[in-house]
Amino acid sequence: MALVTLNFFSEALGMQSEVYVAIPQQSTGGEIGIENNAKKEKYKCLFLLHGLSDDHSIWLRRTSIERYAAEYGICVVMPCVHRSFYSDMKYGGKYYTYVAKELPKIIREFFNVSDKREDNYIAGLSMGGYGALKIAMRECDKFCAGAGLSSVADIRRKDFYETLIPVFGEDMNIPDDDDLFPLSEKTNSNPNKPRIYMGVGTEDFMYDDNLRLKAKFETLDFDYTYRESAGVHCWAFWDEYIQYVLEWMFK
């Protein structure tokens, strides 16, 4: 695997931006301790999203995502969206547009990755879990599957009010397309709706919210997978569960 830091101008944000890209390297003769699964065809691509307190470096620093991805021979793209909740903010940047619409095009411009829907996936943790599920359901023509770990399942949580003011404004006028509950109902009728995966720890402070979203998906006609086990909102849990996500996506 190669790790690339890509700096480029984002038209959506109107500024320079940076993403990390882990991608298989064709020739790795002499490299010790890792299997090379590079392919000749265009790579499948996973967009991997960070949480509220993090940035695009966090998956590399807290997990072995590069090593896990090497097993499947996939490209992993890790963007930074600050505290935007992967939304076009009322007082801030257009981070939904950036991740969901602009970034896939930018990645294909610079890297040998597939533009086919069946080869593009999105996942994340906490705020990024919310973002992954939201983007997967709203961009059915681009992503075949979305996975949320310890997701902010209910964007209307009262304890997020101050955090969300820059995103939605003081009146907290949250569109249905930014609320996973009505969004799942809307997406249910789409014949191209994505496969959905949710994972959460039973001691996570957002466990009950995730259970309610699980119950919602179970009333709908999604290809839906849910997994839980003992755990809190922490990297030990996410390092374990991202491996389950990759197996679910790519095997």
Image (cartoon, rainbow, N blue to C red):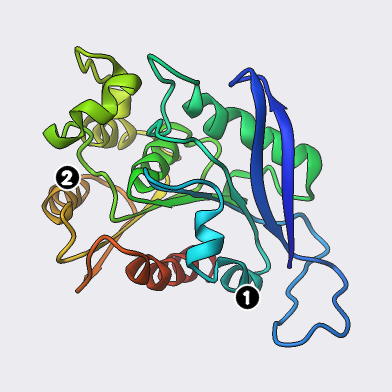
Residue 172 location, quadrant: top left
Disc sitting over residue 198 in the figure: none
Q: Counting residues from the N terminus, which is met first, the one under dot 2 or under dot 1?
A: 1
The three-letter code of the residue at mark 1 reads Glu
Q: Kindly identify which residue carries mark 2.
A: 216
Mark 1: few/some/many CA within 10 Å (<14, 14-19, 20+): some
Q: Kindly identify which residue carries mark 1.
A: 71
The three-letter code of the residue at mark 2 reads Lys
Mark 2: few/some/many CA within 10 Å (<14, 14-19, 20+): some
Task: Please give the name of the residue rendered at 34% of the width and 22% of the height, measured from the top-left corner.
Answer: 167
Residue 5 percent across, percent down from the top left:
72, 48
Q: Is residue 236 above or below residue 162?
A: below
Residue 175 percent across, percent down from the top left:
28, 19
Task: Please give the name of the residue rendered at 71% of the width and 35% of the height, measured from the top-left corner.
Answer: 106
Task: Please give the name of the residue rendered at 68% of the width and 68% of the height, measured from the top-left corner.
Answer: 73
What secondary structure is marked by label 2?
helix
Disc 2 vs disc 1: which is toward the camera? 1
Residue 204 percent across, percent down from the top left:
18, 60
Q: Number of marks in the image?
A: 2
Residue 91 location, quadrant: top left
Q: How far apart are marks 2 and 1 (CA)?
A: 34 Å
Question: Left of 32 or right of it: where is 28?
Answer: right
Residue 192 percent across, percent down from the top left:
45, 40
Q: In this view, does 40 lie above or below 127?
A: below
Residue sitting nearer the eye, 187 or 153 = 153
What secondary structure is marked by label 1?
helix
Question: Left of 88 or right of it: where is 224?
Answer: left
Question: Left of 159 or right of it: where is 142?
Answer: right
Quadrant in which the N terminus is drawn: bottom right
